[in-house]
Image (cartoon, rainbow, N blue to C red):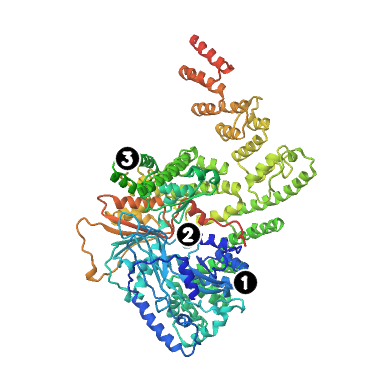
Amino acid sequence: MSRARADEEEYWHSSKFRAFTFDDEDDELSQLKESKRAVNSLRDIVDDDDDDLERVSWSGEPVGSISWSIKETASSSTSSLESRDSSLQKGSSSYAAFPKQVSSYSLSSLFKGFLCVTQFCLSLSALSDTGVKNYAPELRRPKAEYKDYNNDWSPKDTVRRMQRGKVCSLERFRSLQDKLVLLDEAVAGHDGNIITAVLIFLKRTLRREILFRELEVRQVALCHLIHFLKETGEQKLLLDLLRFLDRTEEVALSQYREHLNIQDVEKRREFLKGCIGLPFSAEDTSHIQDHYTLLERQIIIEANDQHLETAGQSEIFRKYPRKASILNMPLVTTLFYSCFYHYTEAEGTFSSPTNLKKTFKIPDKQYVLTALAARAKLRAWDDVDALFTTKNWLGYTKKKAPIGFHRVVEILQRNSAPVQVLQEYVRLVEDVETRLNLATKYKCHDVVIETYRDLKDRIQLTAYKCKVERGSAEEEKINSILSNTVRN
Amino acid sequence: QEHEVEKMFTLKPGRLPQADVKNIIFFVRPKLELMDIITDNVLREDRGRSPQRDFHILFVPRRSLLCEQWLKEQGVLGSFIHREQYSLDLIPFDGDLLSMESESAFKECYLESDQTSLYHAAKGLMTLQALYGTIPQIFGKGECARHVANMMIRMKREFPGSQNSIFPVFDTLLLLDRNVDLLTPLATQLTYEGLIDEIYGIQNTYVKLPPEKFAPKKQGEGGKDLPTEPKKLQLNSAEELYAEIRDKNFNAVGSVLSKKAKIISAAFEERHHAKTVGEIKQFVSQLPHMQAARSSLANHTSIAELIKDITTSEDFFDNLTVEQEFMSGIDTDKVNNYIEDCIAQKHPLIKILRLVCLQSVCNSGLKQKVLDHYKREILQTYGYEHILTLNNLEKAGLLKPQTSGRNNYPTIRKTLRLWMDDVNEQNPNDISYVYSGYAPLSVRLAQLLARPGWRSIEEVLKMLPGPHFEERQQLPTGLQKKRQHGENRVTLVFFLGGVTYAEIAALRFLSQMEDGGTEYVIATTKLINGTSWIKSLMEKLEPAPF
């Protein structure tokens, strides 16, 4: 203990400062007196240990006297300073101070330090669900048990004592009635720590059906148990509980969540297959179905492509080796992958983009964007061109894009498309302002010049002359337009 | 506690200073993930150490029986000689700001219905009252606020002796649920401090910045260590310059900085005029202060430059435009093009979620068709497993279908004047400057409570979730305040579920208003921004490292 203290004092760079202490809550004072009495009465029973402190805490009584101090003077450090005064008789108390900050008003500095030293946690045995394990604090158990039959706290007192971090065995509460009163008291206290402790006790000592039934009418406690089961990963009990409560959607989601813990893809796929039948909302069901189908596809594609890659036969895989496996990637990433490696495949194959588009009902916009990005990355400008070309029944071709050509230009530019390709699409941008902006930004001189010509904007056109290279074809073009328009 | 986790990681490999460390104290939040790390540490440390080490564990703010049970199951509980608690409920962050730093508070309250953090909040408030006197008036809005008030009253009843004789510092306590105002944290904060937080994330008053802009000060250092480590700076009002600019709209920061630069260089120039020894002495005595001011100015100029790079980017502008459209009620009922584009370009998921949630909140829920569309796009682009996250957001009320068929937001917006078209960013006259147009709903509620009182907005209060209430705590006659004319009232505003820096700035602005009549002190469960907040609600998709 003293070693610990010395060390802590070092740790906190304890500093000397003036401090005045406020009175504790009266209640705590009376508790302290009570504690003293208890200690005195215990003295002959409990073996003498090294110091007073230990003894006090062994009794399970409060040993922390609280003292607060406020420091109103400025200090150089802004981190909280804390020191423990070991000379204080009743256990350890903490002083704390917070340096005053420069601020608009002065009720600023405040800090609260409170250190309560209790050595037992709530009767450890009550928490154990799995039987006895051998570990040191178990040795102290007899004393805790001694405490048990010495005191006969009401449920209310028990909860209150637990809130102050004192030892309380719950084993005394044998009847269902008692247990439920205890639970209700804990809930009324709003301290999740205690509620959970009581719930663990109930979970261990009550039959499942009874526990579930009683919790159904105690919503707060119920939420705590659900949270607790989630945290500790007691999936089975959790699902049973949710099923009992008829919270089917939650059951479904909670079960679905499990798939994240499955590393092996085959197992994961199997698991997801099992999830499809779960009672999700209608909308979610289709997503889960898609999730399963996607993973199933990915497994097939992965096996196939891995083979192709190692065989070294396929040119595309040799030129652009895969950076990562496609397993567990999102749908859009998978589509990109398929547009990259399997663009020309017929719709019948699982890995073809059109097949993916159809199976997952990918909207046109999404599809075009993804395909464009993939083909542009490969610099397959013909494919890009084909993506936006539509033929009408007269056989005329027309350029159309579901995403707006300014977006097309951006994507192409990001993939460093040559100016010739770029300007073709800049030209297609409908809004004149945007077109001019893009053309200027990406130096598509022809488009700029043509646009100004169409706008009959001589001033801008003349001004643009200084932006093009001297003696270039573009400059000539500007000159010829400028001289032409005179005649018009 | 992040700080502590860092320390634990350095503990793990066992390269601690050797002999002098006999005791190892784990100072932790009661969380199971942290328990796992500790378990690992203890198990690794124990082996083959000649001087046996003693382990201790301190839980902040409470010992958790659940955690201890967990440690026990891992078989390491016995390694700890002391298991104690350090009941630190409210941590002071600044002169007028207290935080519980419990980032999961919102999630616990609204997703898991776990009210433990509220219990701690009530405890913290009791402590505060023990120090600063009983707060005579308690107002509140929201389910959690009601709970906290109930607990406070109950605690007071249960400890009848706790009536203290301290003259009350606070006149009013205002408890506000975060879910009364889900909108504000989703919007991008536009104060200087808010933007630092949005872009770099302020952790416990510290911020880590990219080092490039912070050139080494001395010539000699330049060669040997190129700045690769992020620059770490502490931010609080102790720094004179920061205190002045932190709460300003970012657009007003530049002019302050350049003004300061002129003053400082003028001050340095003065050395040429110093003729006599006395004058030189005086000049030298001022040097440390001037140097501190200069380095502070240099730092903030660098930060402002970094931020400016981002705020002037096209994407930031587009994002902000969409946010402002939503908040002023434009086109909130259809699929937004910009959001779609962002999804297509795979912008960070959190950004998408922030925008979609913002739209949902500004429309009192989205039309089923719109919601389904967003959901599908998000799942297809980012992965189906995010269905869990979307579900959480729905549960928290951030993302939902419009059920009532009625959009209440326009009424709320108009009554509370949440959208102001004429904002003065340089010399603000209204709190809406912190979001360049949008006045945070939460702060408006505080403002209206002070004057003219909530009775004037009963209708709107009913539209917002949760009950609103008023409680009085009797004071002994001797302690009742007789207010001097012109003396300010002091209100403690407690945000249950988190508060943003912009909201704090808005409250500070109200405190400083000449005719305001009310000063504010702020307390919260956690300092948040839209990103950290949404993150806390997302399902953890990576399995735990252990």
Label 1 sits on residue: B50
Judged from this view, the residue extending furthest toward the bottom is A44
The subunit carrying tag 1 is B
Nearer-N-terminus badge (2/1): 1
Q: Is residue B396 above or below residue A322?
A: below
Tell which circle, 3 or 1, labels the residue nearer the N-terminal end: 1
Element class at badge 2 = loop
Instruction: Examine the rendered structure and indicate whether residue B448 appears above or below residue A407.
Output: below
Q: Position of residue A145 (x, y in %)?
A: 52, 85
Give the residue at mark 2: B103
Chain identifier of the residue bearing label 2 in the image: B
Seen from the viewer's position, the closer of residues B267 and A241 is B267
Amino acid type at mark 1: Ser
Secondary element under disc 3, as helix, strand or loop, is: helix
- Residue B115 visible in the picture: no
Residue A90 location in percent, x, y? 41, 79
